[in-house]
Amino acid sequence: MRITDCLPPADVASSVDPERVRTILADVRARGDVALTEWTRRFDRALPPAWSVPPEVCAQAWHDLAPADRAALEHAAANVRAFAEAQVRALVGFTLELDRGVAVGQRVVPVQRVACYVPGGRHPLPSTVLMTALPARAAGVPDVAVFTPPGADGWPHPAILAACHLCGVHRVHPVGGVHGIAAAAFGTDSIAPVDLIAGPGNAWVTEAKRQVFGLVGIDMLAGPSEVLVLCDATADPVAVAADLLAQAEHDPDAHALVLTDDAAMARRIAAEVDRQQALLPHPAVAAESLARHGCIAVLPSRAALLAAANERAPEHLELMVADPDSWIPHLHSHGALFVGRNAAEVLGDYCAGPSHVLPTGGSGRWQGGLGAHTFLKVLSVQRAGSGAAHGLAVTAVRLARLEGLEAHARAAEVRLGVPSSAAPSENA
């Protein structure tokens, strides 16, 4: 890995053709299942036996898993479910009496129909089923669908189907890519449309989510995966290097970065990355990622490290420093924070509890990761008795006329007993 005195700028450029995406979306919207069949055959080189996977197929996939794999998924699911349920409990409805007879409040209700997108590219990702479907289920969403590409036999990978069974997913659709996003957003003869699409995907899926946003909701526009390790002279270079390589093997566009104020530590980490990379059975993807995007930046002070980390706002931020608790209050922009040597980012990927669907490309400066709250709506409620409405109406009349909205003012005056045909008073 190269050692520099600054981090390279975040590379969020995409080679995706937006017009190509727009064409596919429009085709599926216009022709439904017919277009879905053509695009699936073209891109996935397979055609599902049906556009919905029967529940018994998912159940059989669960039964066929090795017992140790079932146990691992159950352990991870228990943690993800517990964390999501705690998030739901933290977001509550309330009623607040502002004035006598005036009550305002909020209701917290779930989105009704959700699509969880699960990639099916280089590796099957049953963990993504857990990280999207379980928060939706904890939020009380009554219709949770998984959209994921088909395999060679037409059905999604058995591990993904098994995870859908474990999570209680209501329906599974063996379709992915841009045409899968189109099916989720617009619906077809065989697939019901949803209200919100969540989950990671490649650059084409992300562009498709961007284009359907507004007709449906989306969780975020996520790009290539990232890890940034903040470390000082006390860090363990073996653990740092292992985490960098784990991130780099995602794909060639992944970003594995280090910030440190210790030049000797930077050299030790770089050497350890080389040593461990040579031991990987399939190092090509990680090697390309590190060559293109890997970097160890040596900065002069703790303040400079904190400022650079907040500006980068990485998807995953690891804190491998002495007294990490004193650093945390100064870190405000990241997707997920991993504190200390043993809090490996890979644990967050699979089973720690919080979802691994996180903001990338600097978007951690204004948003957090997916959670149960992603699938909840906070709806306001207002009540006012006849007497209590008087004071509010007087204020509303004044503000409406300040803004030049006479119909607004008269709607408030009706609550004051002023006839709707009456002209406004000269001193109103």
Image (tube, grey):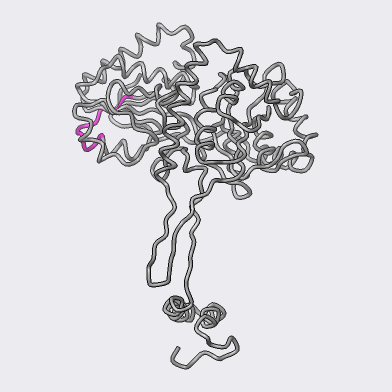
Residue drawn at 25 percent across, 40 percent down: 329
Q: Where's the C terminus, which quadrant?
A: bottom left
Residue drawn at 33 percent across, 28 percent down: 338
In the image, residue 278 sits, relative to residue 287, either above or below, namely above
**Does residue 311 show up?**
yes
Q: Is residue 193 left or right of residue 93?
A: right
Q: Is residue 296 left or right of residue 13?
A: left
Q: Residue 340, image x and y in percent?
A: 27, 25
Q: Residue 286, image x and y in percent?
A: 45, 17
Q: Residue 414, image x and y in percent?
A: 54, 82
Magenta extent:
296-305
User: Which residue is more in the foreground, 288 or 98?
Assistant: 98
User: Which residue is more in the foreground, 228 or 49?
Assistant: 49
Q: Where's the N terminus, which quadrant?
A: top left
* Residue found at the far bottom of this picture: 426
Residue 298 sits inside the magenta stretch: yes
In the image, residue 351 sits, relative to residue 69, either above or below, namely below
User: Which residue is more in the foreground, 296 or 324?
Assistant: 324
Residue 38 sits inside the magenta stretch: no
Residue 162 is drawn in which quadrant? top right
**Does residue 360 show up?**
no
User: Which residue is more in the foreground, 69 or 427?
Assistant: 69
Residue 323 is drawn in which quadrant? top left
In the image, residue 389 sits, relative to residue 159, either above or below, namely below
Q: Residue 388, image x and y in percent?
A: 43, 76
Total numbered circles: 0
Residue 402 is drawn in which quadrant? bottom left
